[in-house]
Amino acid sequence: MASQKVENLLNLALDATEEEREKSLELDVGYNPIDREWDLIIKYSGNLDRVREVASDVVELQNEYAIITIRESLIMILAQFPEIEYIEKPKRLFFQVANGRRVSCIDAVQDTRFALFGQGILVAVIDSGIDYENADFRNEDGSTRIRYLWDQSLVPAEGRVPPEGYSIGAEYTAIQINEALQQPSIQERRRLVPSMDTSGHGTAVAGVAAGNGRNSNGQYAGVAPQSELIVVKLGNPRKEGFPRTTELMQGLDYVIRKALELRIPVAVNISFGNTYGSHDGTSLLERFIDDISNIWKSSICIGSGNEAASAGHTSGVMEEDRDTVIQLAVQNNQPTLSIQIWKEYTDVIDIS
């Protein structure tokens, strides 16, 4: 039986067959069919003692949020715990294109009146990683500007240790990155710090946000060229090929914890997004971002838009005393959802 503590999309996924989940682009996200386990986001009150009894893995985040792994058969038992407020499944994340500084009015705050270049702050980039060898992210002496790099996509092993309190990926400090940069060959550098930005998106985003322009003699410097960086490369322990909201929440939690530890203000850039969820700011991901933005001296910036051609919205005018059919075109401009509204009722009567 569906629980009101369980997100509607998760309830739908639990009711669907495995074949239906596989055909969907979203229903199977977070599900491991081999172990029949789910990665889930929870909001709770009190403590996680009873949750740890039923979950195989628990990553405790700040402000009473957590990422857990739990057998599908135990989800409804979990929902009955009084300390559990809400349960939500992961969603896919997609790149959002970043705009250049030419449309951001940055020059006005970097002239002689203000001279704001990111001095004394951290810029955190949660994305596809970073090319840590790039000169734009190094000081004049060749040392790195990256204080911490957490690559969630790496498998923990000897020399690859996740950050304390987390269970995926590997964390590298500025000391370790500088040691890698001093090596004479790319093979030696990759052996010490094997993190790579294969898509280049995270490197480009970091360049816009904090590149110092050393590759272009200062012509293409970013917004905060004198800041230090914290980088999180989003990964997926299930190797499904895309990051999810569970990894994003852990990355954001990590960044704020590091900024608190260093006692340095942080500006966080998240150029990932999706169009799933409540659309009203009440999903656990959205509430978590709102809540954690009140911790420490942080500014969280999230990309939006870039979907004008996807036909994700529609509009129309209902005429008095007439039945109305609204067709929603959501893929390739082809109508895939038809809603019929009868004149005698105010509710949606038929969805096909």
Image (cartoon, rainbow, N blue to C red):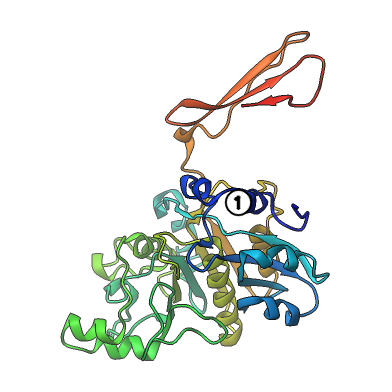
In this rendering, is residue 339 above or below 86?
Answer: above
> What residue is drawn where x is 64% and y is 48%?
12
Q: Is residue 293 left or right of residue 150?
A: right
Q: Is residue 171 left or right of residue 199?
A: right
Residue 305: image location, x then y, percent: 51, 44
Q: Quadrant of residue 149?
A: bottom left
Question: Which sits in the foreground, 22 or 219?
Answer: 22
Q: Quadrant of residue 301?
A: bottom right
> What residue is drawn where x is 74% and y is 26%?
348
Q: How many marks?
A: 1
Question: Which sits in the foreground, 144 or 237?
Answer: 237
Q: Quadrant of the C terminus?
A: top right
> What residue is drawn where x is 27% and y is 71%?
214
Residue at the farthest top position: 321
Residue 25: image location, x then y, percent: 48, 47
> What residue is drawn where x is 69% and y is 62%?
87
Residue at the disc numbered 1: 13
Residue 141: image location, x then y, percent: 28, 86
Question: Which sits in the foreground, 329 or 8?
Answer: 8
- Asked if one can make out residue 43 in the rendered structure from this viewpoint, the answer is yes
Residue 166: image location, x then y, percent: 54, 81
The disc labelled 1 sits on which kind of residue?
A: Ala
